[in-house]
Image: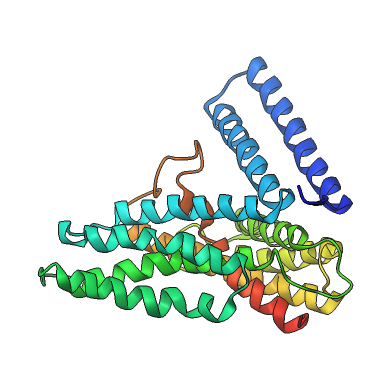
Amino acid sequence: MNGYTIPTPLLWVFAGIFGFLAITTLIFQVLSWKKPTPLLQEMLLRTRSWWFMAAGIALVVMAPPIVGTIIIGYVCFVALREMFSISGFREADRPAMFFAYFAIPVQFYLAYQQNLEVFYYFIPLVMSLSMAFILVLTGSTESIGRSMALTITMLLLTAYLLSHIVLLYNMDIPGYHIGGGGLIIFLVALTGFNDVFQFFWGKLLGKHKILPTVSPNKTWEGFIGGIFSTAGLALGLRFLTPFSIEASAIVGLAIGIMGFGGDVMISAIKRDLRLKDTDDLIPGHGGAMDRLDSILVTAPVFYHLLTFFIPS
């Protein structure tokens, strides 16, 4: 492994995660044996899916960075394929869609190598112009503007935004020894629990709808309670980061707000397409994009806040 070692704080974090999953699975299993109900069966299904997702996150965080980069790149490929499959593209769009997949290894290679200058413009400039030109070469002009907009938007939503996670691996932060794994688990934990917190506070106190036509179950109470709870969690997990107390709180609030933004953005797209989920890849959880909706937005925001508060 070229001398790669796993920092002790990460081992403790994942010991807690897998211990919690083991206890939760045991409780749901015992309850389902005593009195099976559809709700318990659904919770067991979801818990089993969380085992696979937690194992994937553990690999991304604790394996050597090249392994994590490949895994995130593959997840990005699955997400892009989902978005292309549900978006109603024309037959003439297939060459441009096929070409878009080649952007993934290039973008993730640039991220892994920390080639920031090319990383920032490769998809927004090179790929957007290239795919537009390919669409023109097909000779099919009906709805071509929609295709030009959609192909690059889907690539930005998946490959460009998600690849910011890989930038966290090789950041040079003086005096910070946990490394990229600590930053990634901090980001993933805050993004994931933000959804849970907003759901919990919405169920407990929610009365005022925030976006009833986009996501009817979301309320102002859930949103506000969620972002402040996420800020509290950021303070609790600050040991995984180089942040000060003040920076941790600000980052937690930002992830809470932007996580909500990513969630409702993908919800709006699914509502437009009259879909409940983007796919059925993960039992009980939907498709890759149903799980990635928040982190697509929080990842670049977290990275740029990190570079603001902790300049390398």
Q: Nearer the viewer, residue 202 or 67?
A: 67
Rendered location of residue 261, percent (x, y): 52, 69
Instruction: Please report the residue visible at 86 percent of the width from the left and 69 percent of the height from the top.
Output: 176
Rendered location of residue 53, percent (x, y): 61, 42
In the depicted structure, whether residue 277 falls above or below residue 159: above
Q: How many marks?
A: 0
Q: Nearer the viewer, residue 173 or 25?
A: 173
Left or right for 95, reference 110: left
Q: How is the image coloured?
A: rainbow
Left or right for 26, reference 267: right
The quarter of the rendered structure image containing the C terminus is bottom right
Left or right for 6, reference 215: right
Instruction: Please report the residue visible at 61 percent of the width from the left and 72 percent of the height from the top.
Output: 257
Instruction: Please report the residue visible at 83 percent of the width from the left and 66 percent of the height from the top.
Output: 235
In the depicted structure, whether residue 48 falls above or below residue 91: above
Image quadrant where residue 171 sits: bottom right
Image quadrant where residue 40 sits: top right
Farthest top residue in view: 34
Q: Kindly tell me whether residue 223 is visible in this rendering.
A: no
Q: Nearer the viewer, residue 60 or 26?
A: 60
Rendered location of residue 62, percent (x, y): 74, 49
Instruction: Please report the residue visible at 36 percent of the width from the left and 73 percent of the height from the top.
Output: 127
Q: Kindly tell me whether residue 126 is visible in this rendering.
A: yes
Q: Nearer the viewer, residue 260 or 57?
A: 57
Rendered location of residue 147, percent (x, y): 23, 68
